[in-house]
Image (cartoon, rainbow, N blue to C red):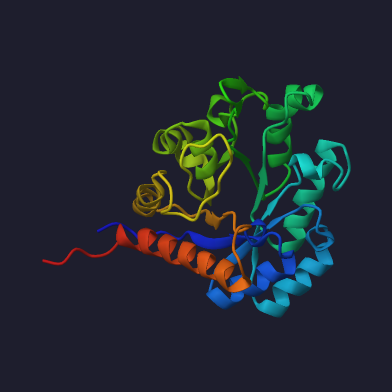
Amino acid sequence: MAEPTHARIALSTASVYPESTATAFEIAARLGYDGVEVMVWTDPVSQDIEALRRLSDYHGIPILAVHAPCLLITQRVWSTDPWVKLQRARAAAEKLGASTVVVHPPFRWQRQYARDFVAGIWRMANETDVRFAVENMYPWRYRDREMLAYAPDWDVTKDDYRHFTIDLSHTSTARTDALHMIDRMGDRLGHVHLADGRGSAKDEHLVPGRGTQPCAELLERLAVSGFDGHVVIEVNTRRAMSSAEREADLAEALAFTRRHLASAVEVPRR
């Protein structure tokens, strides 16, 4: 019999967009998620440590991870200096009791940042107990053209990091094998963004089970291995026609994740 996994299941605050960060805490508590991952972005509440602490205390839902503001739309959030962004993300994680900071590799046009990124992430990781988990990305595609937008590489397993985040919507967009990627990550896999995709050039972030990614197989493999990181539901619910439909999607994602994390560790019946 396999040992039960100690992974906790969190809701990314990005999963409720266009609703607010505050709404994500409310939904996570109501549906029974183990915690939230805060996506730091243009919502002022997501940038405010005291506001986040009050939400966490009010709803009784812990903040397990902080996603640093490294999207195109957050280039001016928490400074235009990418290292300052990471320093503030680390400080937020430490103050909020989160164990992980999720960070994307630099854009290629951030040349100095990209040049120093691997060594800089190691340096910051050595200064804290918070994990800096670097997330896999994907090539940008338009029709038959492909642009490598990230440096040192969108495939973060080609570089030496202490911890990784795997995102299954990103493996779908990159058209790469997610199970082979977690094999390459090995015991440095510290964080999972669970979503699905159908191989589109767009980063789809479908509810797990609605695409072609091996979401169930990955969860079962994590369970058998005793994975003790976080599994974060990071899905796109923008097309939901109502708050009730959005919440139903997030309940479905949570049920899928729990079912497949548990299925690999159940005692077989004779």
Q: Residue at x 77, y 67 (%)?
A: 52
Q: Residue at x 66, y 56 (%)?
A: 14
Residue nearest the viewer, comparing 243 with 98: 243
Return the x and y of residue 163 as percentages of the image width and height.
Answer: 58, 40
Q: Give the answer, above or below, for where 55 lies relative to 80.
A: below
Q: Give the answer, above or below, for where 99 lies relative to 62.
A: above
Q: Give the answer, above or below, for where 258 lies relative to 57.
A: above
Q: Residue at x 68, y 26 (%)?
A: 149
86 left or right of 10 in image: right
Residue nearest the viewer, comparing 106 with 96: 106
Q: Residue at x 58, y 41 (%)?
A: 203
- In the picture, which quadrant includes the C terminus? bottom left
Return the x and y of residue 100 as percentages of the image width and height.
Answer: 64, 51
Return the x and y of residue 19 as percentages of the image width and height.
Answer: 71, 65
Q: Is any part of residue 121 visible from this angle? A: yes
Quarter-of-image position of residue 263: bottom left
- In the picture, which quadrant includes the N terminus? bottom left
Q: Give the answer, above or below, for where 261 lies relative to 28.
A: above
Residue nearest the viewer, comparing 263 with 107: 107
Return the x and y of residue 90 as percentages of the image width and height.
Answer: 75, 49
Q: In the current view of this chain or complex, which residue is farthest to the left?
A: 270
Quarter-of-image position of residue 144: top right
206 left or right of 36 in image: left
Q: Is any part of residue 4 visible from this angle? A: no
224 left or right of 169 in image: left
